Image: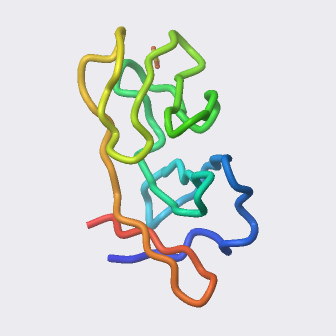
């Protein structure tokens, strides 16, 4: 099911923010090319919000212990993370951003 999570212009290029889709905490990324992606807002190493980390060049780095994830796919890129983070589909319609949590 799709949930509206933001207005497109409210999310700056190259930034990320915490949003809620239904009952799922999501970190929404807006890449420098204007595209969006979304991951579960929870590091796969421990229960820490990825949205509090450092987002740069399509990679989110967890603030707690430095695990890095591909913001497009959720793939884990370095220790201490050994599993990926769940990824969600994002669509933009009429300037509104929707995340599908199915
Ligand atoms: S909780 Fe994210 S790296 Fe440890």
Residue 16 x/y as whole percent: 63, 47
For residue 9, side relative to residue 45 (left or right): right
Which quarter of the picture shows residue 44? top left
Residue extending furthest front? Answer: 33
Position of the C terminus by quadrant? bottom left
Comparing 39 with 68, the one in front is 68
For residue 32, side relative to residue 27 (left or right): right
Relative height, residue 10 to residue 76 (above, below): below
Position of the N terminus by quadrant? bottom left
Please tell me which residue is depicted at 53% across the width and 22% down the height of the picture: 62
Residue 72 x/y as whole percent: 39, 47
Residue 24 x/y as whole percent: 43, 55
Please tell me which residue is depicted at 47% across the width and 64% down the height of the picture: 21
Relative height, residue 101 to residue 32 (above, below): below
How was the colour assigned to the protein in this rendering? rainbow
Comparing 25 with 32, the one in front is 32
Relative height, residue 68 to residue 28 (above, below): above
Relative height, residue 99 to residue 72 (above, below): below
């Amino acid at each position: 099911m799709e949930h509206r999570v933001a207005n497109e212009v409210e999310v700056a290029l190259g930034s990320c923010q915490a949003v809620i889709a239904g009952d799922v905490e999501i970190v929404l990324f807006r890449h420098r090319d204007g595209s969006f992606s979304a991951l579960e807002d929870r590091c796969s190493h421990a229960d820490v919000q990825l949205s509090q980390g450092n987002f740069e060049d399509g990679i989110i780095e967890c603030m707690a212990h430095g695990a890095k994830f591909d913001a497009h796919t959720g793939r884990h890129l370095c220790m201490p993370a050994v599993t990926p983070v769940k990824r969600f589909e994002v669509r933009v319609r009429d300037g509104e951003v929707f995340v599908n949590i199915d």
